[in-house]
């Protein structure tokens, strides 16, 4: 994950030290604090904490102002996300360990969580260019599929089950309504192709399955930490919810991620790896629904991020994604 310019306000640094003092039970010295590039919804800060002579390599993840993902409607709170990660970590899923979490009242300028820093890469480019990764595309994709299947075999954590019960209703209809509402509130998002996609989805909503699973909500290359041996951790669980197993399968193969499945493999190979890991076939009709809804969802998020982007190149990139998605939807409708 690359470093970007920016310094944390002094008051927030003091609050960070105070919070760490409580979490670690000792006086703390924070070193090497630097902001990392981390999506369009949150601020990511890497740092080292020294307490009682012990080094803790940590990451602070806190809500930014007006992110691409709306807290509450589309996202867990940081406290809810931390509780989910603790549960998944305890069950052996490859996620960072959580040190602590809290809200903006703690003085960090927003809701936050602090977790262990997992060494490795998160950018897509090294997978495609660095010689130590070349030739490992199939192996790495098989690992991704295996981890996704492991997540989906986990019992639904209480943190997500309670939210699911509170919302209720058919899973696919709930997600369609969520992103239809989002499109309606984002300037210029309801284009003719998005409107046609939503009408198509409305007529093809699949019935609920007997089996519902933990859905990551943003499961893709770019949200993984990996090394030469493969995947080390799955990051960014803010959009996690209870849902259809094929929702994450469809999202992972969105055409926007440098190519499908991060340009590691094609869709047919990805689905074959997933079917093998999950122990069953992939229902192509259900997958088609989630494929189209994934493109609508990403279009919403990219448009919202583009409206907030300050960097010209970043805005150009996001607008390009919206155009790619529109072209892909045209082929599918």
Image (tube, rainbow, N blue to C red):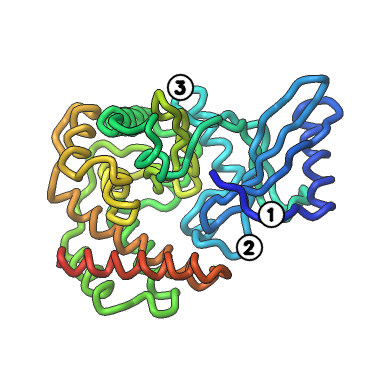
Residue visible at 17% across and 34% down in the picture: 272
**Quarter of the image that includes the C terminus:** bottom left
Residue 15 position, x and y percent, is 81, 45
Residue 257 position, x and y percent, is 34, 52
First in sequence, mark 2 or 1: give its number: 2
Q: Which mark is residue 298?
A: none
Residue that extends furthest to the right in the rendered view of this protein: 27
C-alpha span from label 1 to label 3: 29 Å
Comparing 291 with 259, the one in front is: 259
Up/down of 190 relative to 141, above or below: below
Residue visible at 50% across and 47% down in the picture: 238
Residue 204 shown left or right of residue 212 in the figure: left
C-alpha span from label 3 to label 2: 33 Å
Q: Which residue is mark 1?
A: 110
- Badge 1: residue crowd in 10 Å (few <14, some 14–19, many ≥20): many
Residue visible at 61% across and 43% down in the picture: 79
**Quarter of the image that includes the N terminus:** top right
Residue 152 position, x and y percent, is 33, 33
Residue 89 shown left or right of residue 269 in the figure: right
Contact (Cβ within 8 Å) of mark 2 with mark 1 = yes
Callout 3: helix, strand or loop? loop
Q: Which residue is mark 2?
A: 65
Callout 2: helix, strand or loop? loop
Q: Which residue is mark 3?
A: 92
Residue 179 shown left or right of residue 274 in the figure: right
Up/down of 141 relative to 69, above or below: above
Comparing 259 with 188, the one in front is: 259
Callout 1: helix, strand or loop? loop
Contact (Cβ within 8 Å) of mark 3 with mark 2 = no
């Amino acid at each position: 994950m690359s470093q970007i310019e920016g310094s944390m306000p002094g008051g927030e640094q003091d609050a960070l030290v105070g919070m760490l003092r409580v979490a670690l039970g000792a006086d703390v010295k924070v070193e090497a604090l630097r902001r990392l590039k981390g999506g369009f919804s949150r601020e990511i800060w890497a740092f080292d904490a020294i307490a009682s002579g012990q080094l803790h390599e940590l990451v602070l993840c806190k809500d930014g102002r007006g992110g691409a993902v709306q807290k509450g409607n589309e996202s867990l709170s940081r406290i809810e996300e931390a509780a989910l990660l603790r549960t998944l970590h305890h069950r052996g899923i490859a996620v960072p360990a959580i040190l602590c979490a809290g809200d903006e009242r703690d003085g960090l300028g927003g809701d936050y969580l602090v977790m262990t820093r997992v060494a490795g890469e998160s950018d897509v480019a090294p997978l495609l260019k660095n010689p130590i990764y070349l030739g490992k595309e199939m192996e790495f994709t098989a690992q991704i599929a295996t981890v996704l299947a492991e997540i989906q075999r986990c019992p639904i954590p209480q943190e997500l089950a309670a939210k699911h019960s509170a919302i209720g209703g058919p899973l696919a209809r709930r997600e369609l309504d969520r992103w239809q509402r989002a499109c309606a509130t984002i300037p210029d998002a309801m284009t003719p192709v998005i409107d046609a996609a939503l009408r198509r989805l409305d007529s093809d909503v699949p019935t609920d399955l007997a089996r519902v699973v933990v859905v990551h909500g943003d499961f893709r290359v770019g949200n993984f930490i990996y090394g030469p041996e493969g995947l080390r951790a799955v990051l960014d669980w803010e959009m996690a919810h209870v849902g259809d197993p094929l929702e994450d399968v469809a999202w992972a193969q969105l055409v926007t991620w440098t190519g499908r499945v991060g340009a590691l493999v094609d869709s047919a190979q990805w689905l074959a790896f997933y079917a093998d890991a999950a122990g069953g076939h992939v229902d192509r009709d259900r997958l088609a629904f989630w494929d189209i809804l994934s493109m609508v969802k990403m279009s919403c998020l990219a448009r919202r991020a583009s409206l907030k982007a300050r960097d010209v190149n970043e805005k150009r990139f996001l607008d390009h994604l919206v155009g790619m998605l529109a072209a892909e939807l045209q082929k599918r409708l």
